[in-house]
Image (cartoon, rainbow, N blue to C red):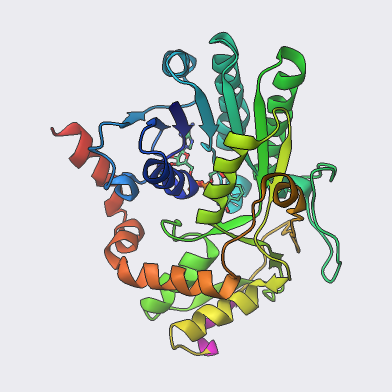
Amino acid sequence: MKILVTGGAGFIGSNFVLYWMQNHPEDHLTNLDKLTYAGNLENLASVQNNPNYTFVKGDICDATLVNELVKDIDVIVHFAAESHVDRSIMDPSAFVKTNVLGTQVILDAARNNGNKRIHHVSTDEVFGSLGLGEQTAFNEQTPYNPHSPYSASKAGSDHLVRAYHDTYGLPITISNCSNNYGPYMFPEKLFPLAITNLIEGKKVPVYGDGMQVRDWLYVEDHCRAIDLILQKGKIGDTYCIGGLTEDIPNIVAIKKIIALLGKDETSIEYVKDRPGHDVRYAVDWSKIHNELGWAPQYDFDTYLERMVKWYQEHEQWWKDIKSGEYQKFYKKQYQQR
Ligand SMILES: NC(=O)c1ccc[n+]([C@@H]2O[C@H](COP(=O)([O-])OP(=O)(O)OC[C@H]3O[C@@H](n4cnc5c(N)ncnc54)[C@H](O)[C@@H]3O)[C@@H](O)[C@H]2O)c1
């Protein structure tokens, strides 16, 4: 099979590329990525010389390029997006361009080349926020109610993907997943920021009182879920993917990280909350469990310990990101040959 992955140099995309190359070595994978600040080819150094892997630096909004690439492939897995809520609050325009218009370009290319199969990776943030202490969780029937420019742009992309299925019969599937964590997570996000700051002897900034609840999904479990959807998912359907069965407030997760690194709670620095901050996300993943047999492989504590260890063992990787050094990698590897 020939597979096109968009955004494969980002956090989840690069984990997916590595996962796919390991579990489906007979397939050919093309990775289309613009290499924004979030794209890091160092994540993919181990596969860059594999004959079944091709990297293309480009923008998903470039219809000519995308159309050319899609001609020759069987399946598209669409990760590329602007993904950081704080950045979307500062400047929503890039989010609308990439997440909405870019998705439309991908959909048109799939449609113009014989209705290619596409899996669209989305977020549970399109459903809005749940109340603290509530027992409810998002599921496939939850109405959309996005609050940030990021989640609004992802909601727009989801609607377009469904519309292309309903209008043109495009064979699509969508997954709405909760917050991912694991290796190669960009150190501006909460867990890796906390881990790397603590290793560097710095404080960990926590928004508000830290009581916001997230549903944490280990990135490898997410990759397995997408694999199952590609193999057995029902065309036209949406699958919610989450990791937890009980609520864990951010501050509790941060305290676990502090304990894993042998530090104490004086390392916490409470900072002004983000505007429109969603208080609680929780995902009911019973559909993908019942229909496709998916479940997280380990519990939160086991995965968190694994993640902390990974950052301890890959100091150069995150130090290069924090210093901006990683942006030179593409030039070194791909332009000076
Ligand atoms: N990280 C999470 O916890 C999470 C949770 C739910 C859903 N998602 C979704 O999963 C997908 C991947 O998220 P992530 O955390 O890996 O994001 P990321 O920001 O780490 O990576 C995004 C990748 O897309 C690339 N990209 C951005 N704009 C592009 C464009 N115009 N053309 C081509 N490439 C472009 C970037 O260079 C980067 O490599 C996104 O669609 C996101 O909405 C993420």
- The location of residue 280, given as percent across then percent down, is 76, 63
Left or right position of 206 against 165: left
- The location of residue 226, given as percent across then percent down, is 57, 42
The residue at the point 76 percent across, 15 percent down is: 167
| 67 drawn magenta | no
- The location of residue 76, given as percent across then percent down, is 52, 28
Please provide the residue range marked out in magenta: 265-270
Left or right position of 60 against 290: left
| 267 drawn magenta | yes
Q: Quadrant of residue 143?
A: top right
The residue at the point 65 percent across, 61 percent down is: 243
Between residue 47 and residue 315, name the one nearer to us: 47
Between residue 142 and residue 36, name the one nearer to us: 142
The answer, for residue 92, to whether it is visible in the render is no
Q: Quadrant of residue 158?
A: top right
The answer, for residue 291, to whether it is visible in the render is yes
